[in-house]
Amino acid sequence: MKKRSLSLLSLVCALCLVLFACRKEIGQIIDTEIPKVSAVKLESAKIYNAKFIAKHLTENSKQPGFVTLNPLWDQAWTLKAAGGNEYVAVPTAIDYIDQLNVTISRLFLFEMSGDEVENAEITEFVGLNYSVEREQDKLILNNKNTSISGFNGAIIHYDLNYRWKGGSIFEDGAVKLTNAAITRKVTFAEPASVEKIPLYLSTLSKTSTGSFTITNYKYLFTPSGRLRVAADGSGSGVTSGMGGDLSVVNVTSTAGGGGGTNTGGTTGPGGNPPPNTGGGTTGGNNSVSARLDNLLLTNYVAPGNKPLFEYSSVCNGISSVESLSQNHSKEVIALVSQDGKLMVIAVTGPNGGSFKGLIRDPDTGIVYYYYPSTDGAPGQQYQGIISGGPRYYIPVKATLHTHPCNTTESTDGVTGYNLSSSDHDMAVKFPTLRNYILGCYALGSFTKNSEHPQLEQQGSNNQLCTIVQ
């Protein structure tokens, strides 16, 4: 009995040694098979992608529902291509697929020459009874070839705006069909409500009228709204306009039949924006929104926050602003909208502070206060507001901030004050804004040329508020 136990114990120990040795070997294999991207190459890819998006931002913003896929940069890797060049491969979000015989991989592929990007696109690999994840490197290196040993599925190419460029369907390792795309059969439960949309691998052919005929080649899956890849733990690798469901991006045109050939009602393989998915619009101000969004890309301005307090007019809010400031020894910062409404955007310490979110339209000179739409809609309507996208832009015409009374500099909060450097810098940067200081029964103003506030008027809040415009 003891001899048998000893033998069993020896066998267990031997198995453990083999297991730990294998784990170590596997770790070494993983380290060598997935090369990390150098910081220089990764930065080149990021800059190339950002420039491409910015270049087409104006035209894209005019199309309701347009979305942008986000690369998951922290998951990037490199591959040596023929001729010594490299690919930088970067995953992005993908739907959860419940079909065992269908696999899909969606990647940003950057072709590198040294540390510079020569070309880039988004590529989708569709496997039919073929694991694209297991053979991913092989597919990347052969993504432009007409034969890939053993491959059954499709390779579909898009630009960095996720606009369809073309694709091929492979059978037994060779190209069988061209102009491959992922399409869908649309079923409306009610107007503007799309539910349970099956996705198909299809081919497209252009008709004499300019529309497209779609031939469904293979049913792929029906999205459930779940994502298989998440970005930074947020649950989505896409912009806020996506709602976390990539099936609406995956569509290159609207298929109208079940499994056969169908024509009419298709807009072609545009890919983006996704048809019939709603999405944010800007209420007729698309070009303005595009200019401002583009400005944020090229000359970043930190966003503000949703207004803390909002009032229908300056006179309705000025007493509340003064009370908040004087009773709590705080400096209150507010803005006056183009239609004369007052919004408090910051409450700082007794010695003052700063705020963020002002941006100037270079074409019109109008100054906007902007903040991310994820903060929620403002509490009241503002004339000229740009909404419906990832940011709210509220046009403003004046600033108003408070000063304490009875200090060594001033008894009324205005007279005798020296303007801070931040006040002066703001006035220089936004010369069209009128800038006011609210003290104790006193109102001052300043411009880019001021060293001290100019006393506008002394009196009650009901008198002072009429000057702020």
Image: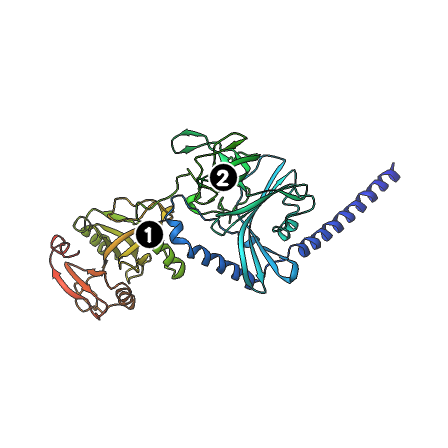
Question: Whole-percent x and y of residue 346?
Answer: 30, 55
Quadrant of the snapshot with the C terminus: bottom left
Q: Front-most of 354 and 268?
A: 268
Image quadrant assignment for residue 436 = bottom left
Q: Which residue is found at the position 48% from the left and 43% from the top?
A: 269
Question: Whole-percent x and y of residue 275?
Answer: 43, 39
Quadrant of the snapshot with the N terminus: top right
Q: Front-most of 87 and 304?
A: 87
Q: How is the image coloured?
A: rainbow
Check disc 1: other Cα within 10 Å, few if <14, some if 14-19, many if 20+.
some
1 vs 2, front mark: 1
**Residue type, mark 2 in image:** Ser
- The alpha-carbon separation of the residues under discs 1 and 2 comes to 28 Å
Secondary structure of residue under mark 1: helix
**Residue type, mark 1 in image:** Ser
Secondary structure of residue under mark 2: helix
Q: Is residue 368 left or right of residue 100?
A: left
**How many dots with numbers?**
2
Reading the image, the residue beneath label 1 is: 287
Q: Is residue 268 above or below residue 195?
A: below
Question: Whole-percent x and y of residue 350?
Answer: 28, 60
**Visible residue check, residue 160:** yes
Question: Whole-percent x and y of residue 363?
Answer: 29, 59
Q: Farthest front residue?
A: 208
Q: Which residue is found at the position 67% from the left and 54% from the top?
A: 33
Q: Is residue 149 above or below residue 455?
A: above
Q: Which mark is residue 247?
A: 2
